[in-house]
Image (spheres, rainbow, N blue to C red):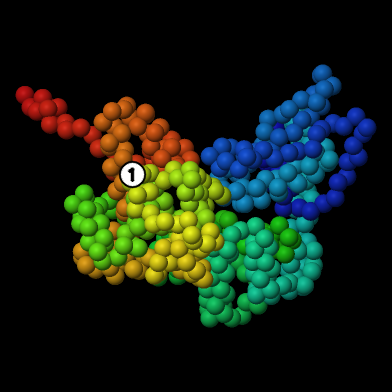
Amino acid sequence: MHSLKELITLDAQNEYESAYDLSVNKKFSTPKIYSASGDLKKRWYLYFSYRHPKTGKLKRVTPFYGNANKYKTKEERLSVLVTYRKVLLKLLKQGYNPYDNNKELYLRLKTKENLKEQHVLDHAENKSLTTVDDKPAMTLQDAFDFGLKQKEKIVNSTTKRSYDNRVKNFLVWLNENHSELKTINNLNKRVVSGFLNEILEKTSARNRNNFRTDLSSIMQVLEDNDIVKLNFIKKIPVLKSIPERNKTYTTEIQEDIFEYLEKKDPILLLYIKFISYNFLRPIEVSRLTVGDINTKDRTIQFKAKNSPLKTKIIPEILWDDLPDLSELNKEWVLFTPLQIGGVWETQINNKRDYFSKRFKKVVKDHFELNKDYGLYSFRHTYITKLYRALMNDSSPFEAKSKLMLITGHSSMSALEKYLRDIDAELPADYSEMLKNTHG
């Protein structure tokens, strides 16, 4: 019996029109996509109903997953399922029956695939300057410009700049190393792999993977718009990379830094306290405006990493350090180079990078701290402190439940992974157990 996956995989390589007329009594429902409300931790799939041969009633059949759930972004996963849905609908119209072995349909599609492959081989030379549907091939620049233009509508400005920079670097590399390639149809997996290998040699596996992800995302737009036949970049494997992590400060060093900054740089100290006491990321602190601080309810609203908008209380330990914001313009940036509350016209990444460099100059150089310590270290340090304090009067589960409300982690599993990564969970002294191992 030929499975639905075999048929979809086979038919996805062909383009053909529907040859099956539905009767008034429809045999099947239109396939739909289940996206779990965007939750990537859950499985996404296609589902549809088919009229059961015995009861004559439409009955939900086994969902189709394919390879959709191996993709780690909403955009890629949805794109795959949209393609599956299109092909599945064609197959149903062609006569696919989940209660049959579908041998006749399989053989029919297989024959058509073989005929098409021969046709492609016979006309390969004549089609060297064409892409999908014999349209004139786009130049590399025009194709990537089109992909970037489409992305501009669905991603934020920071992500768009990332796409722009990586595509620019790729096109410069192509011009220097493969100047003979002029059109998008001439680009292939071998060429892109060569570029990614060079990125790996010069930088890191993580950076190489980021280039692969962005270029694949643009190429997927071109496939979805019939500019190229296949996004081959998806077939280039992701390399295993070891994530870099800032170390946690010792209590002594942390206290020395705070005492030093009280006199040396109060603005930088307050910036750090938002990271330490409210557990914000540096880029989240850099985004804050005066209007994000609710002085009546003592809360703060900010754009977080994993959600459009989050609200947190401002603990008293931080509230007491805030200056009077009541007379300031709500639109002003909270942290500027010279004052709390003011106009600072620059990109958000520039603001974060400014305070990172300021921290290096003022703090790291003074205390002779190495690259393992940074602004992010304060978040690790205070989450560790808080978790261990909660553990004094609570069970591990209770402590983590309380901590999750404070840190803003999206799930218990995400918090537990974070605590493991920063070594916040340490066992009690096990010396007695070791002593008992001696005869």
Residue found 22% across the figure and 67% down from its top? 366
Q: How far across and how far down the image is residue 339, in percent? A: 40, 67
Residue 412, above or below 190: above
The C terminus lies in which quarter of the figure? Answer: top left
Tell which residue pokes out farthest to the front in this image: 327
Between 192 and 324, the residue placed more toward the observer is 324
Residue farthest toward the top in the current orientation of the protein: 55
Q: Is residue 193 above or below residue 280?
A: below
For label 1, the crowd category at 10 Å Cα-Cα, with few meaning under 14, some 14 to 19 and many 20 or more, is many
Q: Answer yes or no: is residue 203 visible.
A: no
- The residue under the point 47% across, 49% down is 295
Looking at this view, is 48 or 332 the one in front? Answer: 332
Percent position (x, y) of residue 2? 70, 36
Q: Position of residue 274 (x, y in %)?
A: 38, 53
Q: Is residue 384 visible?
A: yes
Q: Which residue is mark 1?
A: 383
In the image: residue 213, left or right of residue 44: left
Residue positioned 49% across, 49% down in the render: 294
Considering the image in quadrants, where does the N terminus appear?
top right
Which amino acid is tagged 1?
Ile
| Lateral position of residue 10 relative to residue 327, left or right | right
